[in-house]
Amino acid sequence: MDERDWLAERFQEHRPRMRAVAYRMLGSVSEADDAVQETWIRLSRSTAGAIDNLEAWLVTAVGRVALNMLRSRRTRREEPLGTHLPDPIVDRADGVDPEHEALLADSVGLALFVVLETLTPAERLAYVLHDMFSVPFDEIGAILGRSPDATRQLASRGRRRIRDADPATDADTAAQQEVVKAFLAAARDGDFDTLVAVLDPDIVRRVDTGSGILAEVSGAENVARRAMAASLLGLDVRAALVNGAPGWVSLLDGKVFSVAALTLRNGRITEIDILLDPVRLTRLDLTRLDG
């Protein structure tokens, strides 16, 4: 095996971790793959023999690439402004596919990405690399051109916003799925009182249509009314795991209409995040839902 083949083999070993870093930074599977590919180009042009810790080098390198992509995305005029939902990772309701496990470590639900989108690119990098991947502050600071102390402050700001906006969620997946079943059944049957009963009084429902702005509705009764209205569309609703959390995929005339992910606390639904952008929905890999 020559040096390039050896390097390619080592690179493939670390690819899942690099994709996980890039996905958390960018919220896009396709852009994450682009970032990983760019990292390979940078590695192949480097003096690999001088790299002491290849895994650490790759993680920081893909973080740097993702940071540049995130900054570029926010400055391009053609990109819609505002917050958006990430590309959801969809699995069958009975379990996460092994290929998705690295992407979904640390319970990176859609609701968490909404908060990540509010961070500056530097805060997001510092939080993701340090808190999720244990990269030292001096290495992150080298990417950002800041001191370790300044980088620590960036991660701290990101951590506070995450903690304030994303308190602990219910961990019992089976219990969560029962709540989801009750919600879908009540919506289908037009049972308004049962719908309201499974919703937190302060629930927030966010919908991403691709406009660049998340349409938000809050309050159990308001969300219940919209759920009942959606049930009249004749959708084929299939239970699923969306970013590792209970949710569903809705089909209309055999085509994907929407993907929804839920957040539950204390046995009630506190957040519903719905991707309704037809362009992005066509790009999703839903083959694991077959059958």
Image (spheres, rainbow, N blue to C red):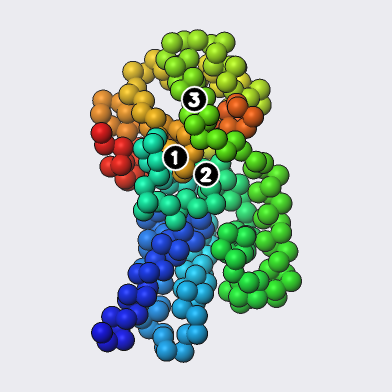
Q: Quadrant of the N terminus?
A: bottom left
Q: Nearer the viewer, residue 24 or 246?
A: 246
| Label 1 or label 3, whichever comes before in sequence order | 3
Q: Nearer the viewer, residue 86 or 169?
A: 169
Please give the label number shown on residue 242: 1
Q: In the image, is 36 to the left or to the right of 227?
A: left
What residue do we see at 49% from left, 61% from top? 21
Q: Position of residue 129 (x, y in %)?
A: 58, 64
Q: Quadrant of the C terminus?
A: top left
Residue receiving disc 2:
109
Q: Nearer the viewer, residue 101 or 226?
A: 101
Question: Label 1 crowding class (10 Å Cα cut-off): few <14, some 14-19, many 20+?
Answer: many
Q: In the image, is 278 to the left or to the right of 81?
A: left
Q: Position of residue 249 (x, y in %)?
A: 38, 32
Q: At label 1, which amino acid type do we have? A: Val
What residue do we see at 28% from left, 80% from top? 5
Q: At label 3, which amino acid type do we have? A: Glu
